[in-house]
Amino acid sequence: MEKITNFYKNKKVFVTGATGFKGSWLCSWLLHMGAKVYGSGFSPNKNKNLFYKLKLEKKIKLGIFDIRDQKKLEKFIFKSKPSIIFHLAAQPLIIESYLNPHSTIDINVRGTLNILEASKKFKFIKSVVLITSDKCYENVGKLTRYKEDDTLGGIDPYSASKSSSELIIRAYRESFFKDKRNCGISSARAGNVIGGGDWSAKRLIPDCIKSLLKNKVIFLRNPNFNRPWQHVLEPLRGYLMLAKKQYIEPKKYSDAWNFGTKNNSVKSVKEIVNYMISFWGSGKIRVNPENRFYEQKNLQLDINKVKKRLKWYPTYSVKKGVQITTEWYLQVFKNKKDPFKVTNKQILEYMNENNWR
């Protein structure tokens, strides 16, 4: 079987949401494997954005436009002619979806629809992985893990936007690609990810780092809230494997896939912060209760299907994920190391640990 690095070498790959946190890590990994990377995104605050910290604007071909603008999107795709697309562009925050439900649904649903329309139109596209979320499931608070064929739903605008996207992906796959186009179309569902370089608002790790860098107390809204945690490289490896497999065998692998966590990955917010403090070497916690919006019950993804058919499985423990996340910030901000080199080093170490060359 062809090695993953050989497969991506010189492949034209388009990443939507390239200027986001996960998109920046994915672009870096693709560059590491020798791919020709094209990306789209907004023009964010360059001082607090991983994409610009890594100077990826000098390393990939970037288009700054709204994913909802179908004409600009299709013009960019036609010009770059990628054979593989990773769709990561989204409004990713539940809290933000309560404040701006219309734009959340518009970005997440119409963005997905525009990618599917372009993939239907351009025959040079061979593999499309559309990233949704574990929040696409109707969370009934069950103790068992959610499987790919469980009921979709969502009682907040963000979750509803992701379940709606899943329905549209399935409809397009069945209506326009199955037995009609030699192009793989899949959705990838993952949960809460952590990693170096995340500066997103109202997220635990970025909030902790901001406090630690200024030697300030870390305020926690819900310290006992439990959820599964996963380092960003884990699901990204799954996306890369899936895109390759459905590029070669689209009929076999075009489907919905869960890229969930290991067993024992559910930790409280307070446990995660205590891990960070221990790796950082200092820090204090204070509880500041705030619960303005509904937060979903704990939800975990069943990964038996992806383990059996894609041979993918998570390898990092939660503690290991928090450790290398903390190390990234320490290396970049305390030791003044080059962010791109630190990121590439962590990618290479992860690949070596997984014997993934």
Image (cartoon, rainbow, N blue to C red):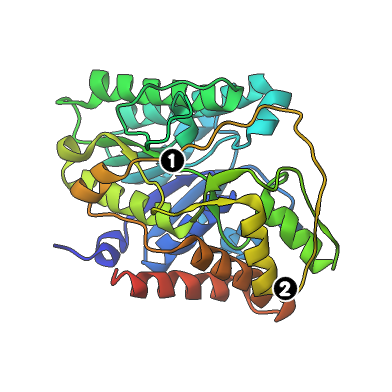
x, y percent for residue 348? 42, 74
Number of residues whose C-alpha sits closer than 10 Å to that of mark 2, classed few (under 14), some (14–19) or many (20 or more): few
Task: Provide the residue designation for mark 1.
Answer: 300
Q: Nearer the viewer, mark 2 or mark 1?
A: 1
* CB under 8 Å between discs 2 and 1: no
Quarter holding the N terminus? bottom left
Q: Is residue 261 depicted above or below 4 in this figure? A: above
* Residue drawn at (70%, 68%) of the image: 277
| Quadrant hosting residue 225 | top right
Disc 2 is placed on an element classified as helix
* Residue drawn at (66%, 21%) of the image: 101
Q: Is residue 258 visible?
A: yes
Number of residues whose C-alpha sits closer than 10 Å to that of mark 1, classed few (under 14), some (14–19) or many (20 or more): many
For badge 2, the amino acid type reads: Phe
Instruction: Say which of 132 and 39 sits in front.
Output: 132
x, y percent for residue 193? 53, 51
Disc 1 is placed on an element classified as loop
x, y percent for residue 257? 32, 39
Quarter holding the C terminus? bottom left
Task: Provide the residue designation for mark 2.
Answer: 333
* Residue drawn at (42%, 68%) of the image: 32
Give the side of residue 9 with respect to residue 279, left or right.
left
Q: Is residue 69 visible?
A: no
N-term-proximal mark, 2 vs 1: 1
